[in-house]
Amino acid sequence: MSDKSILAAETFKNGFNCSQSVLSVFAEDVGLTKDCCFRVASPFGSGIARMQETCGAISGALMVIGLRYGKGEHGLEADKANAYKLSQQLIAKFKEKHKSINCLELLDNLNINTPEGMAEIQKRELFRCSCTKYVQDAVELAESILV
């Protein structure tokens, strides 16, 4: 387990969402402040705005790839193509390990937006057990891509 993945897990345990926790540990690597990372990644938690779609940990890792390799204002189409390729590799590896990148599926199809779903998630400690692992895995996959 890398230092960044441990720090991301601690950040998650301290009340930041999955996306914030992943992106923030790469702040220095991508030339942003932690505060900026926390702000920009804020709406991406719980599968984007609590909609349980794409896992926030994946969104955070994709932001890292984009910030490092994406096409900027004066970039080339090849930069965008490379960012897509690296993103697809990260997603494929995450899916290989966890079978999905969909937040709802990763939380055993329990809806965080219903009292019953949230109660079951809390009872089973899925945020602490499963989501923490997703955060750590997304960080480690992003680290393996950032050379």
Image (spheres, rainbow, N blue to C red):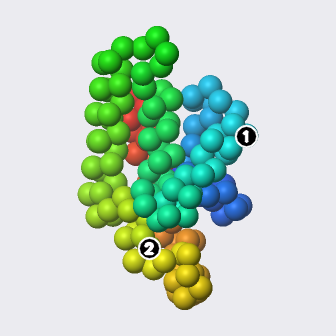
- In the picture shown, does residue 24 fall above or below 52? above
Residue 145: x %, y % from top left = 38, 35
Residue 110 vs residue 7, the one in the foreground: 110
Residue situated furthest top in the rendering: 74
Identify which amino acid the numbered label 2 is placed on: Leu
Left or right: where 145 falls relative to 15: left
Task: Give the residue number, with chain letter if any, for mark 1.
Answer: 35
Check disc 1: other Cα within 10 Å, few if <14, some if 14-19, many if 20+. Answer: few
Which label was assigned to residue 13? none
> Quarter-wise, where is residue 16 in the image?
bottom right
Nearer to me, 33 or 145: 33
The reply to whether residue 10 is in sight is: no
Tell me where residue 18 appears, x and y as whole percent. 56, 57
Which residue is located at x 42 percent, y 70 percent? 104
* 39 over 123 or under it: above or below: above
Residue 135: x percent and y percent?
A: 51, 56
146 is higher (above) or lower (below) than 44:
above
What's under tag 1, amino acid-wise?
Asp
Residue at x-position 32% and y-position 34% = 84
Q: Quadrant of the C terminus?
A: top left
Q: Earlier in the sequence, mark 2 or mark 1?
A: 1
Near mark 2 (Cα within 10 A), the count class, few <14, some 14-19 or many ≥20, is: some
Label 2 – label 1 distance at C-alpha: 28 Å
Q: Which residue is mark 2?
A: 107
Q: Nearer the viewer, residue 43 or 91?
A: 43
Where is residue 78? Give x, y as percent.
Answer: 30, 18
Look at 32% across and 62% down and name the residue there.
100
The secondary structure type at the circle numbered 1 is helix
User: Which of the 4 quarters of the picture holds residue 12?
Assistant: bottom right
